[in-house]
Each structure stands twice: as C-alpha cells, then as structure tokens.
Image (spheres, rainbow, N blue to C red):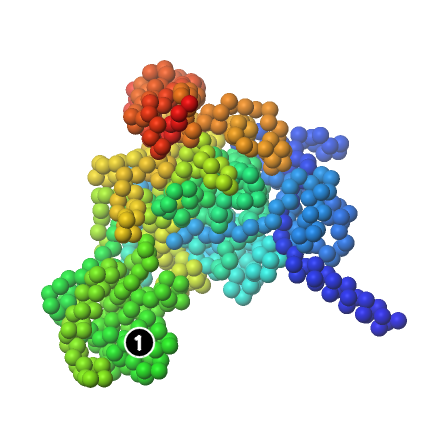
Amino acid sequence: MRALEFGFSVLVSLALLVVLAKAEVYIVTIEGEPIISYKGDIDGFEATAVESDEKIDTSSDLVTSYAHHLEMKHDMLLGLLFERGTYEKIYSYRHLINGFSVHISPEQAETLRHAPGVKSVERDWKVRRLTTHTPQFLGLPTGVWPTGGGFDRAGEDIVIGFVDSGIYPHHPSFAAHNTEPYGPVPKYRGKCEINPDTKKSFCNGKIIGAQHFAKAARASGSFNPAIDFASPFDGDGHGSHTAAIAAGNNGIPVRMHGHEFGKASGMAPRARIAVYKALYRLFGGFVADVVAAIDQAVYDGVDILSLSVGPNSPPATTKTTFLNPFDATLLAAVKAGVFVAQAAGNGGPFQKTLVSYSPWIASVAAAVDDRRYKNHLTLGNGKILAGLGLSPSTHLNQTYTLVSANDVLLDSSITKYSPSDCQRPELLNKHLVEGNILLCGYSFNFVSGSASIKKVSETTKALGAAGFVLCVENVSPGTKFDPVPVGVPGIVITDVSKSQDLIDYYNVSTPRDWTGRVKSFQAKGSIGDGLMPILHKSAPQVAIFSARGPNIKDFSFQDADLLKPDILAPGSLIWAAWSPNGTDEPNYVGEGFAMISGTSMAAPHIAGIAALIKKKHPTWSPAAIKSALMTTSTTIDRAGRPIQAQQYSETEAMKLVSATPFDYGSGHVNPRAALDPGLIFDAGYEDYLGFLCTTPGIDVHEIKNYTTSPCNYSIGHPWNLNTPSITIAHLVGTKTVIRTVTNVAEEETYVIKTRMAPAIAIEANPPAMTLRPGSSRKFTVTLTVRSVTGTYSFGEVLMKGSRGHQVRIPVVAMGYQR
C-alpha cells in the first residue's frame, strides 16, 4: 500500500512540475478599491482614500486592517479556483492598485480571466536599465545650493526612492560618518534589509531604506543568487550610479589609475536614499517586481521616485500606452503626492522611440554637457591622428616603436583566440612588446562586451609596453565610442580612414621577409595626454541615443496629443559612484567610479533637482514641480544659439541639426530658475482621468479596470490637460486650447506673446493679465491651419512678467485639410 501511495505522490509531483514548467508570471487586477482610493463602502472597514497629492498614513490601523482584508481576498480567490501547489502567488498589490502577481499556467490564466471579480490578467513582461561635472554645468553650487542653506543642507530630509539594481552601501558617496549626523525622518517607514554576508544593515542614515524585489525573477527561473545577490546589494553598478547622481554626497574625489578626474556630487547632496532593488545584472527585471517595488516605495513614504527603467517596447497587452500596470501604478503614486522622474529611453535618434508615455510622469531626455575628452597619436611621418583616450601621455619628446599584436604572436595556432583584441597577454611575445607601443584591433568582441579597453590596458601593463593603440578598421553604422579611463598611455582611433592611415604607415615602415614575418619594426609614434577635458560652448546638445518623440497613444504607434519627452538633462559621460562588483560596464569592473551614458543618467538629475524644489516648496504637487522644471528650462546653448541635436547623416556619420520639442521637450533644465518659476500649471488625479477619458480610442472599461474610477470627468479634448506644453497631433481648421496658471510669487503682470512656424497661425488671449499671490487665471491659445505641410510645426507661448519671471511653453501641431 505504501508503495502505491509513494507512486501516487510521485505522479502528483510530476503533474505539478508539468504545470509549473510551462507556467509564467501574470499580473492580475481585481474589483475593489486599493488603499489609496478606498472610500469606506465595506462594513467594518473605514475609508483609507487620500486626496490628490496627499500621502498615505501607513501607521493607521485602518490602513493595516484594510490591507490585510485585500490580501485575504486575493488568497481566497486563488484558493477557490486552483488546487494548492498548482500556483504560486508572488505579490499582493494593495496600496496603489488592487491585485496580485501569480505564477500559473496559460490555462489557469484563462480560468482567472473569466472568474467573477477579475478585471484584467496580463502576462508579466521585461524591463531594462536605460544606460548606454554636472553640478557645476547646471549652476548648482553658486545658484541653487546657497538658497537652500548650502550643499550640506541641499535636499535635507527629502526621501528619493530608486527602483534600480540596488546600492553599494560602502561607497564614500553614500557615507554618513563625514557629515553632520542624519536624524530620523518620521514620515518615512521603509525597512532596511540586513546584508546576509556581513550581518550589517544596508542603512546608515544617508541610506534610509533598502529592500529587494525578486520573486517574479525567481519564479521565471532568471534569478541567480550567486551573481544577482538576494539583497539590496548592487551586483550591477547601475543603481549605485543613479543614486549618486541624484543624492550622492558633495565633493567626493573621483580617483582612478592614480588620477583625480574631479569631485563628484549629487544634485541634492543631503537628500536621503531609499533603495528598492528590482533590476538585475543579466536579464534586467520584470514588471511584477518593479510594480511591487513602486507600490512599497509609495507606501513607505518616499517624496520622489527615480526610475531609470522602462519596458523593452510599448506594452502590447493594453490598447493604450498610458494604461498598463506600470503606468497605472505610477498614476496612483502621483495621486499620493510622489513626483516621478523616468528615463525617456535610449532608442534615439529615431522618431517614436520613447518608453515613457504618460502625462503624470516627468520623462527625461539626455543631453551632452560641455565636457569632451580628446586625444591624439603622433606618427613618425609627422601625421597627427585624432582619437579617444582618457589616459596619460607617453614620455614627452620621445617616440616609441609601434608593434602590431598580429606580428608578435607566440604561436600562429592561437589566432582562434582573436589575439589582435589584446585581451590575453600570454598569447603575445613580451620580449618584442616591452617598451614599445602595442597596436590592437577593435573587433565585434568590444561591441558585444566580451572584450574591453580595460583588458587591453591590463595586457599593455603585463607586457611592459609603453602604451597601446586600438584601431577601428570597420564599424557598424552609428556605433558610439565613449572615452574610457586607463592607467597607461592609450588611444582608440575611432575614424576608420585615420585607422587606415595608421595601418598604411605601419606597413610601409615594417619590412618583412618572403613569409611575411617582420624583419624589423621601424614605425614610430607617441600618444598625447587625454586626461584633461575640453570645455565646449556648444553645450548642451541632445545626445544621439536619447529617445525622440512624437509620443504615441497606442501600440499601433498613433501620435498622442501630449508632448514627450518633457525635459532635457545631462546624460552623456556622467561620472558617479560604481559598485566594484558591477558588471554592467566591462571597462569599469572592480572600479569605484564609472563614466557612463544614457537617459538612465538624465532621470536622476531631474529627481535630485525635484528634491531641491520639494524642500523649498513642501506643499507643491508633483505637477507643480514638473511645471516649474519645464517652464523655466532653456532652448539656448552656452554659445547663445538654439540647442542642437545629434543625428545621423546619410553616411551614418554623426551630424548636428536644430533640435525640436520632440528631442528636448520644453528644453534643458535650469535648476536656479526652477526654484522660482513665477507661475505653475497645476494638475491632479482627476485632470489625468479627464485626459484618459477624452483620448480617442481608449476603452472606458479599460480605464475603470486600471484606475477603479468611472469616466465622470471630461476636459473636452486631451490637449486641454493643464500641462506646460500644447500638442495637437491632428489639427483640422481652428482649435482653441485652455490653460490655467497659478501665481506662486508676488503680484505680477504677465504679457503673453506667441510664435509659431508659418503653416499654423497662433493667438493667445488675453494678451496680458495680472495675478495676485496664490490666484489662478485661465488663458486660451487658438491654433489655425494655414497650409498643410505633412510635417509638425513648432512654436511657443512666452509669458513675460513685470518682476522678471519668464514662463515658456512649447506648442506642437500638425495641420490637416478639413
């Protein structure tokens, strides 16, 4: 009998394995209000709803008991539908959305879809990191920090939540021992996980919360505890980098290879850091984990959320880009008074590449700031070849013999190891390389990450070479080369024609015997000093990788009546903290700092500056903070010319073109002006509902599924949402747009001026208005099609105040025939 029982249990176990083997993670929303919007309709449970821009009182017994009630309902639903062991609940979402994520088979998902009380069932999808000097460039030390009590008070007690790859807590950018002690922040209730290896807390006062979310990643089989770390520890580098940009300590020396590249500082050096790790080294992350992290961060009481993460593509599961579990959760976060900065995406310079869509989010594009690193190689024939190399020079007034890696192989059979990459010193003859400059080839291995410039420098050092040159002989169109700091003289010749010049010179100067073996190395050269940056006035520019508009409203890529990105911030070659375990960038493995690029770097700049605004104006809504950032931004570069955008030319080389709002939104951030914007364009939860309810093609049932709110609120047209920009994607005849401004300064009279490309006529009414402190006034902007060009027309509304405030909003429209 025992044997029969044993056989039966094996069969059951096998059956469960079969179910779970093809199981996937699904995100489920169910009927009933989440904590943030529950109005007390159930006997025994009092209301927990908050007004727009109000924090959830997490300490309240009402909140705790209603949260427990929701979780029990989730468990009961699953228990009624499925046998125990055939499913695994991953998370209960209770604060911002009412639902859960669960690991089930597609058949079980179908059962759930048809169960009473279930509103939506969506398969989880992946997200990724959006990576590819600035305080001085932005004018923070002189223009902004003094007004907040200096850098040692900038952002005091504002909590910034980072949903990212964790943090390296031992970095000096996050140290608490060299600063005035950090006191408690009563409004923040987040947990601090304990490091399983050191048994110490991840928190230190500066880092105020640290949690990790990996249940969906584990369920999918992607999580590897050995390299992903089942803790908030950063095994990637990206999370430490973004946290340091927004809130790292001031004046931290950036030292690498014996050279100091300057001092690093966060935008708000005194702000607190709350870590919500949901991204991992190899696979990025899953929306189920990210939503759980956001849900927890808002519940814990963060003021600002920095998201350097986005979907791999627009969500195909919902009809509209604005209504997926990710954006719906962020809408609830904004309702709770949390400002959200999200990276716009790195799909540029091509149109419609944004991965941040919704009006309640500040979508941040990436700029190249004023620092450029250049170097040069001087050949024995007098030619000077430009290249990239963040390196010291070879000895001055001295030339060195050039030797190619392919000519100093220890054994011809080792060509299978790509010896010209110079990744393995044991393949090359040290006797022939020592004291000379080693020539290497830039292959696809550098693009894929299996080869690195750091390794080339290590090979150079191991062989005793005087330096290295990396030649790019052929290159994929649009390949972007970033300078990499190295401790030995080194340069990458990125221009294929200049690499050819070097190869021709080397071949002419290197006599060979009839077998092709080198008789003597006679080519000479020297490497310049690339450690000092050159400061350019043509900054900022829109970085080539920064995602571009127009914004889209659905998966068929139809244009939305909403401008994105919102704002431009530094995101190219940004120095900040790194995790020595970090493998996100092979050139910075084992280092304490990294200089990397991406809209991932731009978003935390805005998060940190938003913290400074929040500190100065604690009662402002997320929309007010976003408005202050946008209306005070600039569209002029340091040289006084309109900002330019990096773009590909016909030959795929990079060129500069005039930038438009689809590249930079309202313009490049100006922190000093943002602290005192004069007027703000405010909006709240109901305004965003109105936007959704008036966007053509959106299913009202879908809106109710995700927001639990019916469409009782209309703004007439989506372009009437009170944003600091105006976009009409399909303008026929004449349309009039309404905006409301609120005065956040002294009484002031504003004169309103407009300008627009000739294809569209523009007029603002009234032409002037006076606003008392705290008062609001409406004005209209009327757009009329003059000629149909088949392209977008750009313009602006400029409001000049009698006390010196200047408020500017971009206007974008495409005219169509009636």
Q: Is residue 98 above or below residue 780?
A: below
Is 44 displayed left or right of 195 in the figure? Answer: right
Q: Position of residue 191 (x, y in %)?
A: 57, 49
Q: State the image quarter where residue 271 is shown.
A: top left
- Crowding at mark 1 (Cα within 10 Å: few <14, some 14-19, many 20+): some
The outermost residue toward the right is 1
Q: Is residue 406 left or right of residue 586?
A: left
Question: How many marks do you count on the picture?
Answer: 1
Task: Kindly tell me whether residue 476 is visible in this rendering.
Answer: yes
Q: Element at badge 1? A: helix
The quarter of the image holding the C terminus is: top left
Q: State the residue at coordinates (31%, 66%).
A: 442
Q: What residue is shown at x 24% (from left), y 61% (from top)?
A: 496
Residue bearing the label numbered 1: 462
Q: Residue 472 occupies which quadrant of the picture?
A: bottom left
- The location of residue 446, given as percent across then percent down, is 36, 64
Which residue type carries mark 1?
A: Ala
In the displayed orientation, state which residue is furthest to the front. Answer: 818
**Looking at the image, which is closer to me, 619 or 781?**
781
x, y percentage for residue 755?
30, 25
